[in-house]
Amino acid sequence: MASYLARRLTLAIPVLLGILFVTFSLTRLLPGDPCRSALGEKATDEICDAFNERYGLNDPITEQFRIYVSDVLHGNLGDSIKFGRPVTELMVERLPVTLELSFFAMLFAVTVGIPMGIISAYYHNSSVDVGTMIWANIGVSMPVFWLGLMLSYVFGVALKDTPFWLPPTGRLTAGESIEPFYVAWGMNVDGDALTLPGFIANINTLNALLVRDWDGFVDALKHMVLPAIAVGTIPLSIIARMTRSSLLEVLGLNYIRTARAKGVREIGVVVKHGLRNALLPVVTIIGLSLGSLLSGAVLTETVFGLSGVGRILYDSITGRDYTVVQAFTLIIAVFFVFINLIVDALYAYLDPRIRLE
């Protein structure tokens, strides 16, 4: 297993280098003037010359790329042109929001989607199967922004003052806060050392668990329910349909008939013998869906008032903020590679024959 994962990790290195080059090249080829996009059309030539000199935009492209790669290897992602702050600070603030949302959205999609697919496959061609697939088709075709607005209205407005009310915006109730775990633990952190602790502390649910703030955890969890359902509905539908089709194919194989003939309990036949061998394509879908969620859901974050990766990437692209676009694209690519590595490890676990390839 270790040698198999080492081979997969080695193959990821040229992918990351290629992403570095492509992202850098495409951002430089975008039409328009970065100076006037950031400072406005009334910026004078003198101001723009100073702007370009400050951010190295007057250097040859090859020299800009060399400096960029060197800075990335040293952990320096640069300063934002639009926001006037180090990109690492923006990442500590924004990326945890999207990570938290993606985790709960995928948790919702997997815990509901896979059982739906199993039930639908087991009761193939029955009313249960038809009803389940109808809901799956509705879920995959429903616009995310419309679903988000409807969830906000129903649970945030129509059900107000009822036990079913859920907060429609934000990450915590106004006026509430969760003490950062590094403060509660008495950790002495400052400067660059604050980056990782600050990143973890900005994941509200995880931070609340670390400091055992159960009221804060419940509050943060309630604020995640509606956006997680809105974002996770489409992956849920795809996972349910993929689980159904893959499990149907497996349940028709000879070894399943043999297991049933030997008197194995039906739940053991379906879950132990059938589901494990049907999970390979499902794991692929889960990995791809999680990777796409990490790239940011602009509409969902806007509807629910979440300041995550999607919103800052949109603002940075429209404002020609090269450093932010490059940095967040690189981080998202690293997450994609990491997720693919986990998927490969699950492949090898589910089907040991893959380790020999």
Image: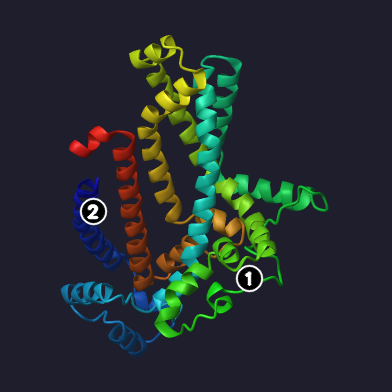
Q: Amino acid at mark 2?
A: Leu
Of helix, strand and loop, which one carries label 1?
loop
Residue 171 in the image: x percent, y percent? 62, 63
Up-down relation of residue 253 to residue 50 (above or below): above
Pointers 1 and 2 in contact (CB under 8 A)? no
Quarter that holds the C terminus? top left
Q: Which mark is residue 178?
A: 1
Image spot of residue 67 (x, y percent): 22, 77
Farthest residue to the right: give it.
161
**On screen, residue 243 above or below 210:** above
Q: Nearer the viewer, residue 44 or 85?
A: 85
Figure quadrant of the N terminus: top left
Q: Position of residue 207 (x, y in %)?
A: 56, 66
Horizontal side of 126 relative to 87 (left or right) equals right
Earlier in the chain: of badge 1 and badge 2, it is 2
Q: Is residue 280 above or below residue 290?
A: above
Pointer 2 residue: 9
Using a 10 Å C-alpha cutoff, classify the residue at mark 1 as few (fewer than 14 neighbours), some (14 to 19) or many (20 or more): many
Distance Cα–Cα, label 1 vs label 2: 37 Å
Viewer-side residue, 10 vs 320: 10
Q: Is residue 102 above or below residue 328?
A: above
Decide if residue 194 is on the left or right side of residue 221.
Answer: left
* Badge 2 element: helix
Image color mode: rainbow
